[in-house]
Structures are given as structure tokens and as C-alpha cells.
Image (cartoon, rainbow, N blue to C red):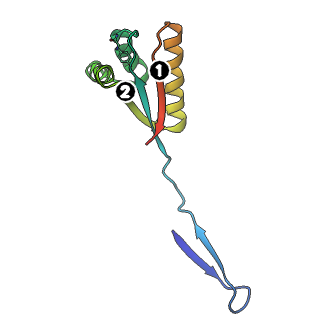
Amino acid sequence: MAEERDNQQGPGVGVVTKTQPKTRRPSLYKVLLLNDDYTPQEFVVWLLQAVFNKGPEDAIRIMLHVHQNGVGVCGVYTYEVAETKVAQVMELSRRNQHPLQCTMERE
Ligand code: TYC
């Protein structure tokens, strides 16, 4: 963080400014899938491929992780991308009448 002191107000008077770096890395958010007893495994595997661009093996691995541990990370994204993925999962689940839940959490 750069500090600059200007000295145009006479002796003993100064303004300290902190200059932000020009680019700031955006905060990242984990998209989490929650387990339930009713959503079919095949639907979760399909969804992980359709929404999160996972390959079939990764999709199966993530689904089984959620099935066994109750929760799992589907991906890490900037805020708006994560928000969109969560909305897509919730809408697809609703349309297919599955209780599948999805949330996001700052990393
Ligand atoms: N537990 C579900 C079943 O046995 C499968 C499942 C996995 C559901 C992951 C949700 O996020 C989930 N049919």
C-alpha cells in the first residue's frame, strides 16, 4: 500500500493518502451442494456436468462425496458467476421436483 505525503498546507501540516493498487483480485465463492435422501444420484451427476462443466468422472466423484459427507464443493467462482450457478441448480431442481439444495460461501 503506497503512502504519499503532500505538503501544500504549510509546515507541520500534511495529508496522508493511501493509494489502492490499480487492480484488486475479486473475492471468490465456493458453490456447495447439499445432500438429501430423495434427489436421484443420476440427476446430481447430470447437473454437475451441465451446470459446472465437470467431466463424467469428476461429476461422479463430487456426487459421491456429497452423498457420503453431506456437503461438497462444486466449484469456486466470482460472486456473480457463483450466484448464477446457484440459481441454475435451484431452478433445475425445482423444475424436476427434486429437493436438492445449493448454496454459496465466501472462500
Ligand atoms: N443421497 C442421494 C441419493 O442417495 C443422492 C444425492 C447426492 C443427493 C448428492 C443430493 O447433493 C446430492 N439418492
Q: Secondary structure at mark 2?
A: strand
Query: Alpha carbon of mark 2 to alpha carbon of mark 1: how far?
Result: 10 Å
- Disc on res. 15: none
Hey, which quadrant is residue 36 in on the image?
A: top left
Q: Using the image, determine if residue 15 lies above or below residue 43.
A: below
| Label 2 lies in ligand 1 vicinity (Cβ under 8 Å) | no
Q: Residue at x 70, y 93 (%)?
A: 11
Residue 101's label in the rendered image is: 1
| Residue at (50% x, 47% y) in the render | 26
Q: Specify few, some or many for label 1: CA neighbours under 10 Å numbering under 14, 14-19, or 20 or more.
A: some
**Which label's residue is closer to the chain start, 2 or 1?**
2
Indicate the amino acid at tag 2. Answer: Val
- Please identify the quarter of the rendering in which residue 45 is found: top left
Image quadrant occupied by the C terminus? top left
Determine which residue is flagged by label 2.
Answer: 71
Ligand 1 located in image quadrant: top left
Q: Identify the amino acid type marked 1.
A: Gln
Q: Secondary structure at mark 1?
A: strand
Q: Residue 4's spot in the image, x, y percent? A: 59, 77
Above or below for 94 versus 85 = above
Q: Nearer the viewer, residue 37 or 24?
A: 37
Relative image position of residue 54 (x, y in whole percent): 34, 24
On screen, residue 67 versus residue 94, left or right, reads left
Q: Is residue 70 left or right of residue 12?
A: left
Q: Residue at x 47, y 20 (%)?
A: 101
User: Is the distance from the Cβ of mark 1 to the nearest ligand 1 atom less than 8 Å?
Assistant: yes
Residue 76 percent location from the top left of the image: 41, 36
Residue placed at 37% from the left, 19% from the top?
49
Question: Local crowd at mark 2 within 10 Å, few (<14), some, or many (≥20)?
Answer: some
Q: Do the CB atoms of the residues marked 2 and 1 lie less than 8 Å apart? A: no
